[in-house]
Image (cartoon, rainbow, N blue to C red):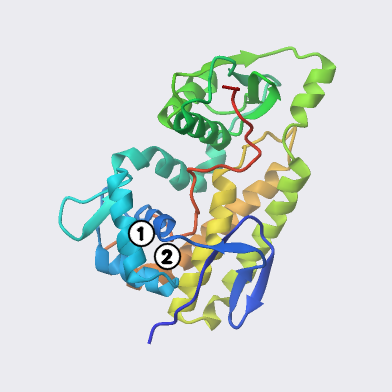
Amino acid sequence: MSLSVTIYRYSNNDFRTQGSLMYPRQAKPVSAKTLVIDLLSTMPARHPVPVGALVRAAALFGIGENSMRVALARLRSSASIESDTRGFYRLSRKAQPVNRKVRSWPTLEQGACDWDGSYLAVETSGLHRRDRRGAKVRDRALRLLGFERLSPALMVRPNNLVGGATTCRERLVELGFAPAPVLFQLNDLDPELEQRARNLWATADLEARYAETRANLERSTARFPELSVDEAMAESFQIGGEAVRQLVLDPLLPKEIIDTAARSAVVEAMRQYDRVGREAWKQWAGASVELERSPVDMGTLDSVPSEVPALAST
């Protein structure tokens, strides 16, 4: 008989142990909608998944078949997923830009280069909030690329991304930022403004989370031999999800601002954890399918943390 457990989505690395599984202390249940997206995003590109497999996975996480079928219908209606064959689903092309960002965590640091001390800036005074969906997508795009607000009309990040302003502009557009951003390189800040810019990111909190996340991954990896397959699936989904979400939302700051070695250690710990997670999920995926990554709880990236302020007033 399969083990039925309830999996929770959370916002920190504060875990408790209940029975044989690790759980966060403060959390919300994972929704059927986010579970569908999380599972489909692990499959090879454009690979469909039978509804029966999704329902079986949902049962493991305490989500009923009816809830899963309703979620599938709503996601298809919103064009987040698609189905060419009755009873088979895959991510839609609409969902691919964010999915590519999620998939990129193993090569996260390859996107950074040496920092010359300048910043990339996005001017936001001409952007209005009346189109709430558009504003939400712009907020998410800026958050995914590590921008923070320096002034009421200016979002900035260190200019240490490979490809500089041109590539950053293209990535924002790919992530749905519309109209195309007014993005430029910002140099020669006065000392006071330079200090303000460097302090925009809560680096002490980020570094503490690096240490906590690495410890949670290593502790969970050590526990895997003691867990049943269902327990390993549940725990890897939960704990791996926290780590991947942290990496996907990492601002990729330069060594002049943050401890980059600590960040690298989290990436390496997650690479190792991903291998054991994939092994746990192999039976669910089927012997003929090579998962792109271990299924993990990403919650939803349609909403972003409160660190991203409003782009402009109405």
Q: Residue at x 57, y 70 (%)?
A: 221
Closest to the observer: 195 or 274? Answer: 195
Closest to the observer: 181 or 220? Answer: 181
Q: Of the two numbered discs 1 and 2 on the same chain, state the one appearing first in sequence.
A: 2
Q: Vertically, is 226 above or below 213?
A: below
Quarter of the figure with the N terminus = bottom left
Q: Residue at x 54, y 60 (%)?
A: 240
Q: Which residue has dot 2 on it? A: 278
Q: Residue at x 73, y 32 (%)?
A: 200
Q: Residue at x 37, y 71 (%)?
A: 64
Compared across the picture, whether 236 is left or right of 285 comes to: right
In percent of width and height, residue 202 lies at 74, 40
Q: Vertically, is 308 above or below 262?
A: above
Crowdedness of circle 1 by 10 Å Cα count: few (<14), some, many (20+)?
A: some
Q: Which mark is residue 291?
A: 1
In percent of width and height, residue 307 lies at 66, 38
In percent of width and height, residue 293 lies at 42, 56
Is residue 44 among what the camera can see? no
Q: Amino acid at mark 2?
A: Arg
Dot 1 and dot 2 residues touching (CB under 8 Å): yes
Q: Which mark is residue 104?
A: none
Closest to the observer: 60 or 292? Answer: 60
Q: Secondary structure at mark 2?
A: helix
Is residue 162 among what the camera can see? yes
Q: Amino acid at mark 1?
A: Leu
